[in-house]
Amino acid sequence: MLKVVIIGYGEMFTNLIAGTLDANCQIVGILRSEMVKYNPIQRKLKDIFNPSLDYNYIKSYNLPEIHSNGVNTKKFKNALLKLNPDIILVGSWGEKISKEIYDIPKIATINAHPSLLPKYRGPNPYYWVIKNQEDVTGITFHLIDDNIDTGAILAQEEIKIFPSDTGKSLKERTVLTARGVVCELLKDLSEDIIIPLQQREDKASYYSHPDEYELDFNKSAEENSATIRAIYPWDEAYFYCYDGEYSETSLCADPQGLEISDNNTKFTEPGTVVGINENQKQISVLCGNNRVLTMHIEHCKKYDRPFTKNYIRREIQIGKTI
């Protein structure tokens, strides 16, 4: 029976735990991000009064926790040496793991990355694959090495991207797929030798954290729809509506209920409002490819949101360019 240590947070982390248990492996240690994020007193109070889903999940299976404030600390290293794991699994983690640590397991330290490596290395590929209007993504389990997401591949599975997918829905399907893939991978590692497949650098791409999600109606309706869906649930795509010469209001677009249609109006300039549904807080805007994007909008400022209908009635008219 393989002995496994699991590091991480969130849905990928809990699904790696589930997949490891499905494979009948022994989880000998867990390191969750809250061990690093909070000091011991803060963490203990949080675990009592506002426990996270990660904490509840760990406790429901009575899994042993490793108490360390980082993966590259002497305390964590000593814990690993004592536990003598066959494998370390990593599912979402902010620190770069040092060679001194990732070399400790008898078999390997393995990362779960939510893309088809070598494409979309880096953080939050859920956002980037939707933003770039890809048709397919995936989950990759790879060896950890000295660089970011460059280690040899042990297992990989494709995941279809649907036209209605948001970052949230794609992530939910990806982590569930990861559960099945890690289960089969651990079974294979316990029974046989897997030959790691080196990544092709000529096929590699790297994307950093998303930092720009302002809509641009000079672009196509499909590109703007992709931006709106991709950033959800981490943030909201937005645009500015000019109220006058010296005044503008920022408005956010909801990924639910997006529609793209042909332009059957007399308008031709991108950014022109061609339809309004005040009660539904919807507007339809002509985009650069002469197609219309219909979206539900709200004030970006949360305390102004109850007044969105009034704003639409007062400031947005058919034929206005935003």
Image (cartoon, rainbow, N blue to C red):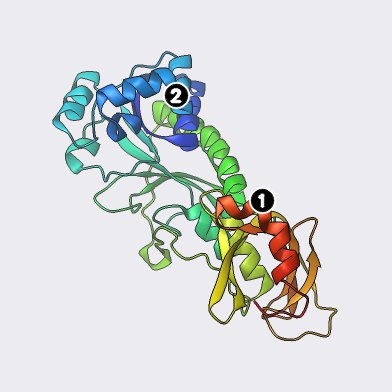
Farthest residue to the top: give it. 62
Task: Identify the residue position indicated by label 2 in the image.
Answer: 50
Above or below 55: residue 36: below
Residue at figure coordinates x 22%, y 25% from the top left: 80
Q: Quadrant of the N terminus?
A: top left
Residue at figure coordinates x 28%, y 44% from the top left: 95
Q: Which of disc 2 and disc 1 is earlier in sequence?
A: 2
Q: Nearer the viewer, residue 240 or 147?
A: 240
- Say which amino acid is labelled 2: Asn
The tag on residue 306 is: 1
- Dot 2: few (<14), some (14–19), or many (≥20) neighbours within 10 Å? few
Q: Position of residue 173 (x, y in %)?
A: 60, 42
- Say which amino acid is labelled 1: Pro
Above or below 130: residue 110: above
Callout 1: SS: helix
Callout 2: SS: loop
Q: Position of residue 22 (x, y in %)?
A: 52, 22
Q: Position of residue 207 (x, y in %)?
A: 41, 62
Q: Is residue 75 left or right of residue 248?
A: left
Q: How much space separates mark 1 and mark 2, taking CA atoms?
A: 29 Å
Q: Is residue 311 left or right of residue 95?
A: right
Q: Is residue 85 visible?
A: no
What is the quadrant of residue 226 in the picture?
bottom right
Q: Nearer the viewer, residue 250 or 82?
A: 250
Q: Position of residue 81 (x, y in %)?
A: 19, 24
Farthest residue to the left: give it. 74
Which of the two marks, 1 or 2, is nearer to us in this view? Answer: 1
Residue at figure coordinates x 41%, y 53% from the top left: 123
Q: Is residue 311 left or right of residue 5?
A: right
What is the quadrant of residue 238 in the picture?
bottom right
Q: Is residue 57 left or right of residue 165?
A: left
